[in-house]
Amino acid sequence: MSRRTQRRPAAGLDPGPLPGLIGYRLRLAQQTVFRDFAASVHGISPGRIGMLLLVEANPGVTQSRLALAVGRDRSTMVGVLDQLEAKRLVERRKGADRRTNGVWLTRAGRSLLARAKRAIADHEQRVAARLSAAERAKLLELLGRIGA
Amino acid sequence: MSRRTQRRPAAGLDPGPLPGLIGYRLRLAQQTVFRDFAASVHGISPGRIGMLLLVEANPGVTQSRLALAVGRDRSTMVGVLDQLEAKRLVERRKGADRRTNGVWLTRAGRSLLARAKRAIADHEQRVAARLSAAERAKLLELLGRIGA
DNA sequence: TCATATTGTTTTGATTTCAAACAATTTGCG
DNA sequence: CGCAAATTGTTTGAAATCAAAACAATATGA
């Protein structure tokens, strides 16, 4: 007895204790979600879209605060913004404190974001296809209690 | 009005629509979980431990089947197993089909895994600290319905 | 004023992953 | 059986993603 109770664990392999671990299920879920995202929003990664959304909600935000917000190092943010700036989606403007750069969406950035938002809405529906509205809300809440 | 309802979104920044997206919450949760894992199980990543658990549950499993099970390319598996073999945690043995390698845990691999399992149990408890047993089960179930 | 802190940057390196091409081997069709 | 086609593990090359350390410019505060 003791057949593992799971949908499609690992292509015929015995998944062992993995399916009982939150971290493992998170990884699988994220993999699925990211792949759907990549297939529906082209040319830009989930993380980069997240960055744009953050800049949209906080125009002129500083690079360091952005880095802190997404849990990355300051030095990591440099390359990310270089990319986004090379694509003309954001621009850096010197702040009043001349050490800082304020980050702003360009017109192209706002336009891409508007298009992306529609794609994301569809994406989100596919992701939650097997969940009722209440279950989806519950999932978001539980995830919020895991990820501080 | 319309203060975003979230715990600690992004260090004082307006998180925008992100907290309403499953993918975003998954990423945050996974980040938290992986960091706790790294802090409690030293010298080996969650993915690598998962690999060992899979090999333990399926002694002699083939590299290709392992790759399929974890959703990686065959060529990716080569480097991963090279690492684990360099650490003397697994070994490859030629199979009856001489194209294939069977993967097996070494004594050291079993020993490390036994130790890791205890650390993982503690880790799992910390991760689910803010969840009741029922909530934890619900989370696993909902995640299973996201990540095919 | 001047020691201290912060900001963005550069450089370096680690990690993880895939794709394409390849030899060895097996399988299956005729 | 015999040989074309598929499979397996591998090598090579490349692309993302990220962090740590050191640095110059600038701001802060005692």
Image: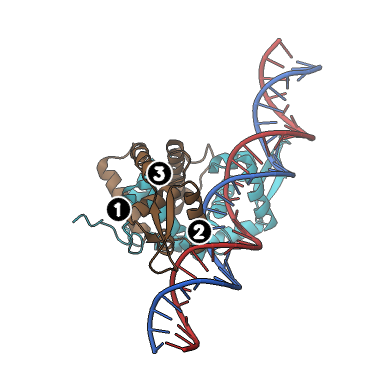
Chain colours: A brown, B cyan, C red, D blue
| Residue at the image point whose x is 65% and y is 54% from the top | B84
Residue on which the image places disc 3: A108
Outermost left residue? B1
| Residue A114 image point, x, y percent | 34, 41
* Amino acid type at image mark 3: Ala
Q: How far apart, in angstroms, are the residues tagged by discs 3 and 1?
A: 34 Å
Q: Chain of mark 3?
A: A
Q: Which mark is residue A78?
A: 2
Residue situated in front as seen by the camera: A47 or D7? A47
| Residue at the image point whose x is 65% and y is 42% from the top | B75
What is the crowding at mark 2: few (fewer than 14 residues within 10 Å), some, or many (at least 20)? Answer: few
| Image height of D27 relative to A104, above or below | below
* Amino acid type at image mark 2: Val
Quadrant of image for the C terminus of chain A: bottom left
* Amino acid type at image mark 1: Glu
Q: Which quadrant of the structure image shows residue D23? A: bottom right
